[in-house]
Amino acid sequence: MTNTNITNFRKDIYKLLENTIKYNEPINVSTKNGNAIILSEEDYNNLMETLYIYSTPNLKEELIKRKNSSDDDFVEENEVDW
C-alpha cells in the first residue's frame, strides 16, 4: 500500500492513480481529519463481489461444492432452456 499525505497526493495524483490502476496498489491518503483509501476499480469490484458472496447464506459453501463437483454434474450452455 502506498502511503502519502494530501499535499503530496495533490502533486502526484496522476502518477499515483496510474500506479493504482496498473498495479492494483491501494493508496492511503492521510489528512488532518483522517485517512482515505483509494482502490482501483478492479479491486473495488472484487471486494464487493467477495462481500456479496460472504453475505449470502450458504453461497460460499455451494460455490465450493460446485467447484469440487465432477463435470458430469453440469450441462452444456446450449442445453439450458433460457
Image (cartoon, rainbow, N blue to C red):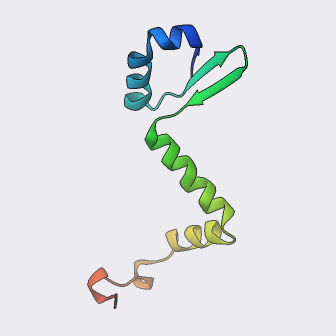
User: Who's the residue at 45% across and 41% down the image?
Assistant: 41
The answer to which quarter of the image holds residue 14 is top left
* Number of callouts: 0
Q: 6 or 3, which lies in front?
A: 6
Q: Position of residue 55 (x, y in %)?
A: 68, 62
Above or below: residue 47 compared with residue 33:
below
Q: Position of residue 1 (x, y in %)?
A: 57, 23
Q: Residue furthest right?
A: 33
The answer to which quarter of the image holds residue 77 is bottom left
Left or right of 14? Residue 27 is right
Q: Position of residue 42 (x, y in %)?
A: 44, 43
Left or right of 50? Residue 75 is left
Q: 3 or 31, which lies in front?
A: 31
Q: Residue furthest left?
A: 78
Q: 41 or 67, which lies in front?
A: 41
User: Who's the residue at 55% across and 8% down the image?
Assistant: 7
Quadrant containing the C terminus in the rendered view: bottom left
Q: Position of residue 34 (x, y in %)?
A: 72, 21
